Image (tube, rainbow, N blue to C red):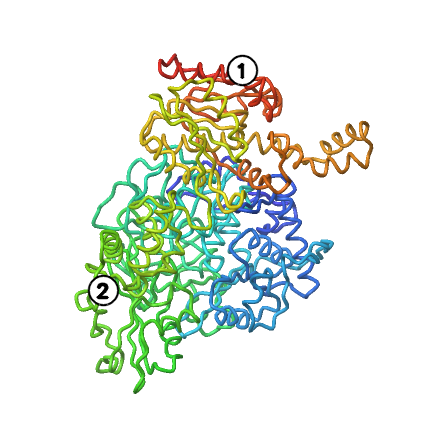
C-alpha cells in the first residue's frame, strides 16, 4: 500500500513558506500503476503501526487498528445496502471520533461521504439529505431523530448489531475521478448547494499538506471545525494519512479563545487550526513559551491582525473555496509588516494555478485588482444535480493547452503584491463571510419571506467595526403585521444555522429602488443608532454597571440598559464566548457559557455572577468546589499545599503537622468533583486551574510549596506550572510516587495485555484455584483502590475510571520549579527508573528519593517516617538553596 514517502531530491526543493518552489509529489505505489486513495493510506498506517493513537476526545481514544476495524464494519454494512462509487452517504454525528469512523467506512465502501452538522435546524438537514439523494444516513441514537423528514435507510453507529458485522469488503471499482465527499454551502437561490470533490482532489490536498507542514506520526492535530465546514476535511485526512493523531476539542471550548488556548496546550497539540475570528482572538492572549504548538493554521475570513513577536508558533493564513478542495493559497504571517495593509493570503500551493482577470476574462497587469480564477488538481467536479450552475462557475480553461482543463470562478477580487503574494480585496457579488462561514444573503431573504408577516426583504452585510461584519435584514411587512425582531429571529433560527441569522432587523415601508428597478443598497438606512434606542431601565449598582460597560465595549455600544438582551443588541455565539472570558477575568469566577444564553441581559448576568461569587470558588451550582482541609494555618513559613484526589488521601496531613512543627502551615486540597466523580469533560489542566483561586486565597503570592500523591502529584505539577507561567515563584514541588503520564500510559497498557493477564491468572490460580482467581482478577481494580485507604470503600466510592483517564491523557507542559520525586521500588521498576520519567521531562532540577513501602503504604506507618525525614530536610533546604541538581540520585 502506498505511503507518503518522498525522495531526498524532492525534499530539497521544499522551501517553506515559498511553495512555488515545491515540485509535484508522487508517492511510491505498490506496482499497480495507480495512485493511492486517502483511505488506503490510513489503512496502511493501521497495518504498520496498529497501536498508535489515531483519534482522541474527552471520553474516547482510538488506535489506528480500532479505527480501521470499526470503519471496515461500517463499509461492510454499507456495501450490503448497495453503496458504491458516486453514491453519497450522509453522516449526522456530533463532532467526535464518530465522524472519522463513519467517513472512513464510507470511503472504504466506495461511496462519498456527506457531512452534516447535527446542530443545524431539522428542515435544513432534511433538505441536504433529500437533495443529495443519499440512500443511507449514518448517525447515533441521539442524532438520527433529527432527520425526521428523510426516507433514507439509517445506520446507527452505537447499535450493537453493527459490532457483529464480519468485515469483508468486495472490490469497489472506485477510481480517482469518483467522488470522495460532498459538502453543502450557502446558495444564492435560497437553498444550499452541494459541492462535489473527487478522490484525486482530496489526495492532492493531503499530499501537499503533509509535506508543507512536515507532518509526522509524532504530531498531534486539533479538530475544531463543524463537520459541515470544509476545514474539517483538512483537520482529518492529512494527519491520519501521515500516522499522526487527531484530537477533538471539547465542545465547551470551541468558541472561547482562552479555553481553546488552554486546551491546545494541555492536549499537547502541535498543529492546530482555528477559524479567523478565533485565531485573531487567540493572538491577543498570553501563550506559554513551552507550548507544544508549532503551527497555527487559520482561514475562512479576512485576517486583520498580525501575530505579536515571541509567540511559540508560526501563524499561517490560508485561502480557498470549498469548490477547490479547502485551500488554494497559503503563507506564513510575519509579525512585522505594514500596519495599513492586512496580511496576505499567501501564494498558490503546489499543483494549483491562479489567474487574476477582468470582466472579459483577460489577465490584468500585476498589482491591479481582478476576479480570481483557480485551476489545477484541486478544482472539484461541480455542484450536485446543478449542471446549470456548474457550467456557470466551472469554465473551460483558456490559459491551458489541455482540452479538458477547467477553471473555477471564485467571485473573489484579489490583487498581486510586488512580492508575489495575494491580497484579498472583496467580492464581485453579495456573498459574504460571517464568522468564517460563506453566506449568500439571498438565501436568508428567501427564508425570511417564508414568515407570514413578511412581504419582501433584503439582507446585507455591514462592517460594524473592523473585523466585525454583521448581517442586517431590511423587511417590508404585510398590512397590519407587527412582528417583533425576536419573532423573526426565532423564525430564521428554525431554518438556518446560527451564523446566518441577522443581528439587526430594520422595518421599511418599501425597499428603495434604482431607476432600473433593482434594490438601491446605498439608500438602505443604517440600523438604529445606539443613541436612538430605548435602552429601558438603567443599570443599578456597581455590579450591573460593570457588566453593562463590558457588554457595551464588546458590542461597540455606548449605553446598555439593564434589561436589554445581549443577542438583540447584535451579540452572537462567538461574542458570547468573549463576553464570558471578560467576565471570568474581571470577577475571577467560572461563569459557564450557557449563562449568557439563559440570562441574556445585564440584570440576569448580575444575578448569576452574584450567585457564583457567593459559592466561594465560583463553580456552577451543580459542581463541587475545591475541598479544603486547613489542617494548620498558623506559622511564618510558606504554606505547604498537599493535593490528593479523595478524602481519605488527606490522612497523611496529621503526620506532616507533627513532623514539620508549629511554624509550618499545611493545607490539604481536593479538586472539584460531583458526587465523588470527576467531570469527564475536564482534564488535569482544567482541574488545576479551578484549584488555583483557592490556593491564591490562602497565599496570594510566592514562594509556593506544593506536593501531591499519585494523581494529586500531577495536579501539583500542573498548578506549579500555571503559577510559574503567571510569573510566580514555586520554591519547592514534591511528588509522592507519581509517574509521568507517558509512564502511566505504558503501565496501564501493559496491565491490559493478554500476556500480563495470563501471568497474573496463572500465579493466582496456583494459590486459590481457578474460580476464585477469575473472580479476583476480574475485580482487581476495586481491590487495588481499597488497598490505598485505611477505610473500607465500596467499588463506587472512588472514581477509578476517571482517575485513570486524567492520568493517562494529561499533556504535561514542562517547567523549571525545583522538583523532588519520592519513588517506591515498584514505581521505579514500572516507570523504568528512579525519576519515574520526570528526569527526562522536567526542565528544572530533579531530586529522586527512594522510599520504603509501595504506592499505597509509603504514606502510612512505619514507612512514612522516611518520607517525613526527607520532606522536613528539603523544606528547610529551600530556604538556603544548594547548587542545582540535574540528575536523580
Number of marks in the image? 2
Residue at position x 60%, y 30% from top? 789
Residue 44 x %, y %:
63, 44
Q: Relative to 772, is 457 on the left or the right?
A: left
Closest to the observer, 174 or 124: 124
Dot 1 or dot 2: first in sequence order is: 2
Q: Which residue is mark 2?
A: 537
Asked whether the beta carbons under mark 1 and mark 2 sit within 8 Å of each other, the answer is: no
Which residue sits at x=47%, y=17%?
659
Residue at the spot of label 1: 866
Query: Which of the two residues, 410 or 296, is positioned nearer the viewer here?
Result: 296
CA neighbours of label 1 inside 10 A, class few (<14), some (14 to 19), many (20+): some
Question: In which quarter of the view is residue 802 placed?
Answer: top right
Q: Is residue 777 above or below residue 567?
A: above
The location of residue 367, given as percent across then percent down, is 25, 54
Residue at the extreme bottom of the image, as rendered: 479
Amino acid at each position: 500500500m502506498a505511503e507518503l514517502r518522498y525522495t531526498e531530491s524532492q525534499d530539497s526543493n521544499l522551501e517553506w513558506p515559498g511553495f512555488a518552489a515545491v515540485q509535484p509529489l508522487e508517492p511510491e505505489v505498490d506496482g499497480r500503476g495507480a495512485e493511492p486513495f486517502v483511505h488506503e493510506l490510513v489503512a496502511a498506517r493501521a497495518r504498520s503501526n496498529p497501536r498508535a493513537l489515531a483519534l482522541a476526545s474527552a471520553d474516547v481514544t482510538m488506535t489506528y487498528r480500532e479505527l480501521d476495524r470499526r470503519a471496515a464494519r461500517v463499509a461492510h454494512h454499507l456495501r450490503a445496502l448497495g453503496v458504491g462509487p458516486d453514491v453519497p452517504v450522509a453522516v449526522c454525528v456530533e463532532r467526535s471520533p464518530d465522524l472519522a469512523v463513519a467517513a472512513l467506512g464510507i470511503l472504504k465502501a466506495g461511496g462519498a461521504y456527506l457531512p452534516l452538522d447535527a446542530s443545524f435546524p431539522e428542515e435544513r438537514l432534511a433538505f441536504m439529505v433529500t437533495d443529495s439523494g443519499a440512500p443511507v444516513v449514518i448517525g447515533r441514537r441521539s442524532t438520527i431523530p433529527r432527520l425526521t423528514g428523510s426516507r433514507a435507510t439509517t445506520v446507527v453507529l452505537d447499535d450493537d448489531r453493527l459490532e457483529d458485522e464480519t468485515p469483508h469488503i468486495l472490490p469497489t471499482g472506485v477510481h480517482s475521478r469518483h467522488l470522495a465527499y460532498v459538502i453543502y454551502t450557502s446558495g444564492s437561490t435560497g437553498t444550499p448547494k452541494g459541492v462535489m470533490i473527487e478522490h484525486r482532489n482530496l489526495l492532492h490536498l493531503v499530499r501537499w499538506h503533509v509535506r508543507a507542514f512536515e507532518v509526522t506520526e509524532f504530531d498531534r492535530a486539533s479538530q475544531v471545525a463543524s463537520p459541515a465546514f470544509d476545514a474539517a476535511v483538512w483537520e482529518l485526512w492529512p494527519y491520519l494519512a501521515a500516522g499522526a493523531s487527531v484530537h477533538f476539542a471539547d465542545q465547551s471550548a470551541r468558541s472561547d479563545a482562552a479555553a481553546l488556548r488552554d486546551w491546545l496546550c494541555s492536549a499537547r497539540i502541535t498543529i492546530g487550526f482555528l477559524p479567523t475570528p478565533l485565531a485573531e482572538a487567540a493572538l491577543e492572549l498570553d501563550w506559554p513559551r513551552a507550548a507544544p504548538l508549532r503551527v497555527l493554521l487559520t482561514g475562512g475570513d479576512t485576517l486583520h491582525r498580525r501575530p505579536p513577536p515571541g509567540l511559540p508558533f508560526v501563524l499561517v493564513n490560508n485561502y480557498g473555496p470549498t469548490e477547490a478542495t479547502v485551500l488554494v493559497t497559503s503563507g506564513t504571517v510575519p509579525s512585522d509588516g505594514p500596519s495599513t495593509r492586512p496580511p496576505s493570503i499567501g501564494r498558490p500551493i503546489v499543483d494549483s494555478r491562479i489567474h487574476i482577470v477582468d470582466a472579459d476574462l483577460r489577465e490584468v497587469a500585476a498589482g491591479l485588482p481582478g476576479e480570481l480564477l483557480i485551476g489545477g488538481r484541486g478544482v472539484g467536479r461541480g455542484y450536485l444535480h446543478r449542471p446549470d450552475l456548474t457550467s456557470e462557475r466551472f469554465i473551460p480553461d483558456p490559459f491551458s493547452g489541455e482540452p479538458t482543463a477547467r477553471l473555477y470562478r471564485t467571485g473573489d477580487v484579489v490583487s498581486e503584491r510586488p512580492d508575489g503574494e495575494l491580497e484579498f480585496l472583496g467580492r464581485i457579488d453579495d456573498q459574504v463571510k460571517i464568522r468564517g462561514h460563506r453566506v449568500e444573503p439571498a438565501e436568508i431573504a428567501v427564508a425570511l419571506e417564508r414568515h407570514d408577516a413578511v412581504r419582501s426583504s433584503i439582507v446585507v452585510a455591514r462592517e460594524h467595526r473592523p473585523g466585525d461584519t454583521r448581517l442586517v435584514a431590511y423587511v417590508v411587512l404585510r398590512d397590519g403585521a407587527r412582528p417583533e425582531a425576536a419573532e423573526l429571529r426565532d423564525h430564521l433560527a428554525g431554518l438556518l444555522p446560527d451564523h446566518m441569522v441577522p443581528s439587526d432587523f430594520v422595518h421599511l415601508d418599501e425597499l428603495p429602488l434604482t431607476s432600473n428597478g433593482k434594490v438601491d443598497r446605498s439608500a438602505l438606512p443604517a440600523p438604529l443608532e445606539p443613541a436612538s434606542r430605548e435602552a429601558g431601565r438603567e443599570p443599578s449598582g456597581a455590579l450591573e454597571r460593570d457588566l453593562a460597560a463590558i457588554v457595551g465595549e464588546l458590542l461597540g455600544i455606548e449605553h446598555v440598559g439593564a434589561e436589554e438582551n445581549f443577542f438583540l443588541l447584535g451579540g452572537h455565539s462567538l461574542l458570547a464566548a468573549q463576553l464570558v472570558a471578560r467576565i471570568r477575568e474581571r470577577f475571577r469566577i467560572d461563569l459557564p457559557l450557557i449563562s449568557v444564553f439563559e440570562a441574556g441581559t445585564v440584570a440576569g448576568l448580575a444575578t448569576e455572577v452574584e450567585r457564583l461569587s457567593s459559592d466561594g470558588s465560583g463553580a456552577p451550582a451543580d459542581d463541587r468546589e475545591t475541598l479544603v482541609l486547613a489542617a494548620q494555618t498558623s506559622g511564618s513559613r510558606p504554606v505547604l499545599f498537599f493535593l490528593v484526589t479523595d478524602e481519605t488521601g488527606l490522612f497523611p496531613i496529621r503526620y506532616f503537622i507533627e513532623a514539620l512543627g508549629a511554624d509550618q502551615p499545611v493545607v490539604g486540597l481536593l479538586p472539584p468533583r460531583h458526587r465523588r466523580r470527576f467531570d469527564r469533560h475536564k482534564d488535569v489542566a482544567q482541574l488545576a486551574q479551578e484549584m488555583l483561586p483557592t490556593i491564591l486565597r490562602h497565599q496570594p503570592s510566592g514562594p509556593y510549596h506544593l506536593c501531591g500523591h499519585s494523581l494529586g502529584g500531577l495536579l501539583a505539577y500542573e498548578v506549579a506550572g500555571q503559577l510559574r507561567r503567571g510569573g510566580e515563584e514555586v520554591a519547592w514541588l514534591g511528588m509522592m510516587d507519581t509517574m509521568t503520564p507517558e509512564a502511566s500510559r505504558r503501565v496501564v497498557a501493559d496491565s491490559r495485555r493478554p500476556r500480563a493477564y495470563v501471568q497474573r491468572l496463572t500465579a493466582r490460580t496456583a494459590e486459590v484455584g481457578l474460580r476464585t482467581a477469575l473472580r479476583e482478577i476480574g475485580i482487581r481494580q476495586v481491590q487495588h483502590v481499597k488497598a490505598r485507604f485505611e477505610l473500607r470503600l465500596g467499588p463506587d466510592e472512588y472514581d477509578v475510571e476517571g482517575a485513570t483517564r486524567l492520568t493517562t491523557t494529561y499533556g504535561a507542559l514542562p517547567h523549571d520549579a525545583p522538583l523532588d520525586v519520592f519513588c517506591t521500588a515498584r514505581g521505579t521498576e514500572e516507570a523504568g527508573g528512579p525519576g519515574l520519567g520526570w528526569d527526562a521531562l522536567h526542565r528544572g532540577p530533579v531530586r529522586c528519593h527512594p522510599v520504603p513501602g509501595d504506592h499505597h503504604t509509603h504514606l502510612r506507618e512505619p514507612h512514612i517516617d522516611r518520607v517525613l525525614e526527607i520532606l522536613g530536610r528539603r523544606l528547610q533546604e529551600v530556604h538556603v538553596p544548594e547548587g542545582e541538581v540535574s540528575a536523580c540520585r
